[in-house]
């Protein structure tokens, strides 16, 4: 009976038009823009959603930039965007920590945007591991051996263990890669013998939960648009939103055919959102 129920629900969901949701969550790179170029028609599609009074958020795992810088980039590319509409992993982590009430004194492995976001949330940044109630782990190109040791000491003493994003590496132009937050998480997990407790970024559903809470919308009212199966599709699956996969980024129809789960919609581009 329950199975029948789920099938029926699935069928109803798939009958829903792309424009029938109340909240739209956009991955950025590969979905709204590719590097420094707007995906053709993305401005028109977003304009149509705004004209229809839809809620819009832009999501990104990358913890090296400020939300305001992403909003500025969108505006430069011709897409109106408010700073508060960009939820990158440092913002999502800050919103999560403000709700979760794990403590106030934070030792950070992370760069300026992460530190600023935590200060904005009313947290105190500490260097002394004995003072730390929380260890935040992020991508940090300035990290030192001493700071990693301080994080280890704080974790051994029972500080809570959270992180911005799980990406082990970040792709760079020319096919190269750079160490990302996930590598530092793995290092500290191995050293302290504990697993990270919460990660704000994709595919953890935390990022969408804090946005939907802010909007006052249920997951079923929201459509997530993204280009990556293992993060965007997986995020939608875990958070319970509908997912539209766009083919302007890393995923081809061939990849999609080999993937066990399938998105609710497959779009050539985000431009297909416009009526
Ligand atoms: Mg992407």
Image (cartoon, helix red, strand yellow):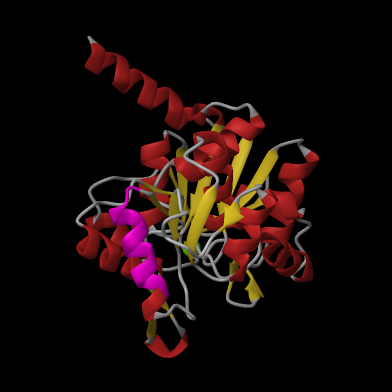
Which residue is most to the top? 1
Above or below residue 254? Residue 93 is: above
Residue 209 is situated, as x and y percent measured from the top left of the image, at 51, 36
Q: How many marks?
A: 0
| 184 vs 223: above or below | below
Say which of 102 and 156 sits in front: 156
The residue at the far bottom in this view is 174
**Percent position of residue 22, x then y:** 64, 32
Report the magenta residues as a range.
Answer: 147-158
Q: Is residue 42 left or right of residue 193?
A: right
- Residue 205 sits above or below residue 203 on the image: above
Who's the residue at 76% across and 35% down the image? Answer: 53
Q: Is residue 176 rendered to the left or right of residue 255?
A: right
Q: Position of residue 24 (x, y in %)?
A: 61, 42
- The image quarter containing residue 228 is bottom left
> In the image, what residue occupies the spot 72% across and 69% down?
73
- Quarter of the image where one finds residue 227: bottom left
Say which quadrant the N terminus sits in. top left
Inspect this view and state whether residue 251 appears: no
The x and y percentages for residue 180 are 40, 72
Is residue 160 located in the magenta-colored stretch of the structure? no
Q: Say if the magenta span includes residue 148.
A: yes
Q: Give 6 or 240, whichever is nearer the viewer.
A: 240
Q: Quadrant of the C terminus?
A: top right
Q: Residue at x 37, y 71 (%)?
A: 148
**Residue 150 sits in which quadrant?**
bottom left
Q: Is residue 128 in sight in this rendering?
A: yes
- Magenta-colored segment: predominant secondary structure: helix
């Amino acid at each position: 009976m329950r199975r029948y129920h789920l099938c029926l629900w699935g069928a109803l969901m798939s009958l829903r038009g792309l424009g029938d949701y109340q909240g739209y969550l956009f991955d950025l790179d590969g979905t709204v823009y590719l590097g420094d170029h707007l995906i053709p028609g993305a401005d028109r599609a977003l304009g149509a959603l705004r004209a229809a009074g839809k809620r819009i958020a832009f999501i990104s795992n990358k913890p090296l930039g400020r939300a305001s810088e992403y909003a500025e980039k969108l505006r430069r590319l011709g897409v109106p965007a408010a700073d508060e509409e960009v939820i990158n992993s440092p913002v999502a982590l800050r919103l999560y920590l403000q709700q979760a009430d794990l403590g106030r004194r934070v030792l950070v492995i992370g760069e300026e945007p992460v530190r600023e976001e935590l200060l904005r949330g009313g947290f105190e940044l500490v260097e002394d591991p004995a003072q730390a109630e929380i260890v935040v782990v992020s991508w940090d190109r300035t990290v030192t051996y001493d700071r990693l040791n301080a994080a280890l000491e704080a974790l051994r003493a029972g500080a809570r263990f959270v992180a911005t994003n799980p990406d082990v590496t970040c792709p760079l132009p020319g096919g190269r890669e750079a160490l990302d937050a996930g590598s530092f998480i793995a290092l500290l997990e191995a050293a302290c013998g504990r697993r990270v407790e919460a990660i704000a970024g994709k595919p953890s559903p935390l990022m969408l939960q804090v946005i939907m809470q802010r909007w006052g919308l249920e997951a079923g009212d929201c459509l997530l648009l993204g280009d990556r199966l293992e993060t965007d599709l997986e995020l939608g699956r875990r958070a319970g939103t509908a997912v539209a996969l766009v083919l302007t980024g890393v995923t081809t129809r061939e990849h999609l055919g080999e993937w066990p789960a399938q998105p609710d919609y497959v779009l050539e581009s985000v431009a297909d959102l416009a009526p």
